[in-house]
Image: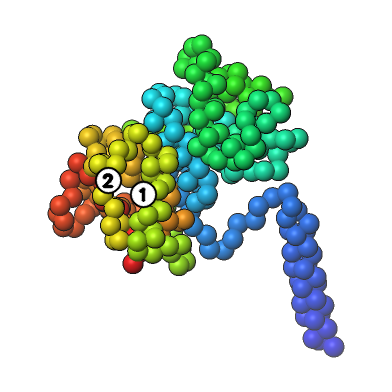
């Protein structure tokens, strides 16, 4: 008889636990529950932003397209704030009505063919083209400039992402050093020559003419990108780290710092190894 209360308590605890799990499951379609172990990216540039690898890669692509087009840092921030609001930096195909992609652009509103809009580079390029036609956008609030392009039913929604977008823009345009740090867990997506080829292909697609063929050397162990300034070096270094999870990138070195996939952070290089501020070296898993 003395054990009865303990049994009752145990049963109540079990029921409570099962009920809590059921509640979580009931909301699973509306919220994204964090996994116990996941790769994350931390961006630190006069503020901090945490993204998952998919979001980070998309943010880096949006920034690269802007820099390649010669758009100012503020334009990149506006684009990033817009994508954060419209899609949470995910290339979505399930938006309102026929809205597609990072910016939820609608084919029926003249943004282009659906298959093209699904390409982050195309959709970013179209966004910048529209933004460039907005007179004085650099002096506007981010939400006002974004609204002139998007014509959203919620014109002030973009402003809540302004701080995060500025942090990302500073880092991804090379205005901050060692600002993008991603931790990569699990087995590499690719190895050796396949990983190096994937990195080079992505670089050329995102940076276009900003990365002439002669500026990069590709090998089975990785690739090297020659740069003309510290700013451009950090642009490429941050882009590489941003795309680490889906390419098999293991290590990036620039100037006197090195990022490793396992450690997930930038640390001083312990030996010279030919490292300087004229080239970014990327090594892949073998």
Instruction: Check if mark 1's residue and mark 2's residue have beta carbons within 8 Å.
Output: yes
Mark 2 secondary-structure assignment: strand
Locate the N terminus by quadrant: bottom right
Q: Residue at x 70, y 39 (%)?
A: 95
Question: According to the image, label 2 marks what residue?
Answer: 216
Mark 1 secondary-structure assignment: helix
Query: Hey, which quadrant is residue 6 in on the image?
Result: bottom right
Q: How many marks?
A: 2
| Residue 46 seen in this snapshot | no
| Between discs 1 and 2, the one toward the N terminus | 1
Taking 4 as reference, is 262 left or right? left
Q: Is residue 175 above or below residue 5?
A: above
Taking 138 as reference, is 176 left or right? left
Q: Residue at x 78, y 63 (%)?
A: 22
Residue 77 screen position, x and y as percent: 47, 29
Residue 18 screen position, x and y as percent: 77, 68
Colouring scheme, one of rainbow, by chain, secondary structure, one colour: rainbow
Query: Hey, which quadrant is residue 72 in on the image?
Result: top left
| Residue 165 seen in this snapshot | yes
Q: Is residue 244 above or below residue 189?
A: above
Judging depth in this view, the residue of 215 and 88 nearest the camera is 215
Question: According to the image, label 1 marks what residue?
Answer: 200
Q: How many other residues sit within 10 Å of disc 2, few (<14), some (14-19) or many (≥20)?
A: some
Using the image, tell me which numbered label, if any, was put on residue 39: none
Q: How many other residues sit within 10 Å of disc 1, few (<14), some (14-19) or many (≥20)?
A: many
Query: Hey, which quadrant is residue 102 in on the image?
Result: top right
Q: Residue at x 49, y 12 (%)?
A: 136
């Amino acid at each position: 008889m003395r054990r009865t209360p303990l049994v009752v308590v145990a049963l109540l605890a079990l029921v409570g636990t099962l009920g809590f799990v059921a509640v979580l499951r009931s909301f699973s379609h509306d919220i994204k529950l964090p996994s116990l172990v996941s790769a994350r990216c931390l961006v630190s540039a006069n503020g901090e932003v945490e993204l998952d690898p998919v979001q980070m890669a998309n943010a880096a692509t949006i920034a690269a397209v802007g820099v390649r087009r010669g758009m100012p840092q503020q334009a990149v921030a506006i684009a990033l704030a817009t994508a954060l609001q419209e899609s949470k930096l995910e290339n979505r195909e399930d938006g309102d009505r026929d809205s597609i992609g990072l910016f939820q652009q609608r084919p029926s509103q003249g943004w282009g063919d659906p298959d093209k809009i699904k390409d982050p580079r195309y959709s970013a390029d179209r966004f910048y083209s529209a933004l460039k036609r907005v007179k004085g956008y650099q002096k506007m609030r981010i939400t006002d400039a974004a609204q002139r392009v998007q014509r959203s039913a919620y014109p002030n929604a973009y402003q809540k992402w302004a701080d995060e977008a500025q942090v990302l823009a500073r880092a991804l345009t090379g205005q901050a050093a060692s600002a993008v740090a991603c931790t990569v867990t699990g087995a590499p997506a690719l190895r050796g020559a396949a990983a190096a080829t994937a990195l080079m292909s992505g670089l050329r697609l995102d940076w276009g003419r900003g990365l002439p063929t002669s500026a990069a050397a590709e090998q089975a162990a990785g690739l090297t990108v020659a740069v003309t300034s510290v700013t451009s070096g950090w642009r490429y270094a941050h882009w590489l780290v941003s795309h680490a999870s889906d390419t098999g990138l293991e290590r990036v070195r620039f100037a006197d710092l090195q990022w490793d996939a396992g450690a997930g952070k930038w640390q001083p290089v312990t030996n010279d190894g030919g490292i300087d501020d004229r080239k970014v070296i990327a090594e892949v898993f073998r």
